[in-house]
Amino acid sequence: MGLPLFARISGLMIASLAVPAMLLAQDYPPDLSRGKAVYERHCLSCHGTSGRGDGPAAASLRVAPANFQRFGSFLKSDEELLRTIEHGIVFSPMHSWRGQLTDEEMSDVLAYVRFLSQQAR
Ligand code: HEC
């Protein structure tokens, strides 16, 4: 007569918990307008309005913020850029954003950085 009741219930619970988590991890569509909002709040001061690394705080930094419109940034993969956003760069004002931004915010802001990096092409 099929599975014991306990197995059926716990199977159901696992299925209903696992599905939304999988959707978020794999199929979250980055949202450019949310990415722009995150960028303006957290990144613009260094990286500048158009991503050229000329934000108001840039002049006082020892390491110049990346200019996303340079070919070097344009060529980098999403994974590489996301790794930098997530973990930061050692001995650089570009610190890790893990813990301050959610995974969704990081993927949204990555989409916006990608958008800026394409502006010069
Ligand atoms: C305090 C200034 C500052 C802030 C704020 C800042 N960054 Fe940066 N960022 C830098 C600097 C400086 C570098 C270059 C580091 C280096 O080359 O050592 C950099 C590099 C990067 C890179 C690497 C680009 C490449 O071509 O490899 C990415 C991507 C990036 N920043 C994204 C962001 C995002 C997204 C935010 C906001 C969530 C942000 N940064 C906020 C200073 C900043």
Image (tube, rainbow, N blue to C red):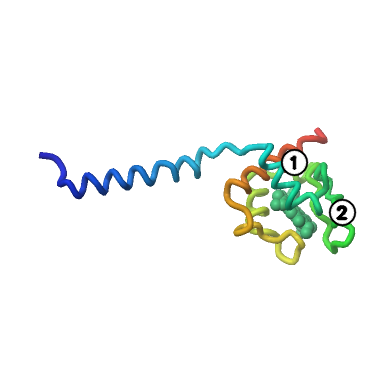
The amino acid marked with disc number 2 is: Pro
- Residue name at image x 61 percent, y 58 percent: 98
Q: Could you classify mark 2 by the number of other residues whose Cα lies within 10 Å: few (under 14), some (14-19), or many (20 or more)?
A: few
The C terminus sits in image quarter: top right
Q: To which quarter of the image does residue 73 belong?
A: top right
The image quadrant in which ligand 1 is located: bottom right
The amino acid marked with disc number 1 is: Phe
- Position of 2 with respect to 32 (left or right) is left
Q: How far from the left and from the top, in percent, is residue 19?
A: 40, 41
- Residue name at image x 38 percent, y 46 percent: 17
- Give the CA separation, mark 1 to mark 2: 23 Å
Q: To which quarter of the image does residue 36 belong?
A: top right
Question: Is label 1 or label 2 in front?
Answer: 2
Q: How far from the left and from the top, in percent, is residue 75?
A: 72, 41
Question: Quick one: SS at disc 2?
Answer: loop
Which residue is labeled 1 in the image?
A: 74
Q: Is mark 1 within 8 Å of ligand 1?
A: no
- Position of 13 with respect to 21 (left or right) is left
- Residue name at image x 84 percent, y 46 percent: 52
Q: How far from the left and from the top, in percent, is residue 111?
A: 67, 40
Question: Quick one: SS at disc 1?
Answer: helix
Name the residue at the left extreme: 1
Q: How far from the left and from the top, in percent, is residue 53?
A: 83, 50
Name the residue at the right extreme: 59
Which residue is labeled 2 in the image?
A: 56
Judge whether 73 appears above or below 46 on screen.
Answer: above
First in sequence: mark 1 vs mark 2: 2
- Position of 108 with respect to 71 (left or right) is left
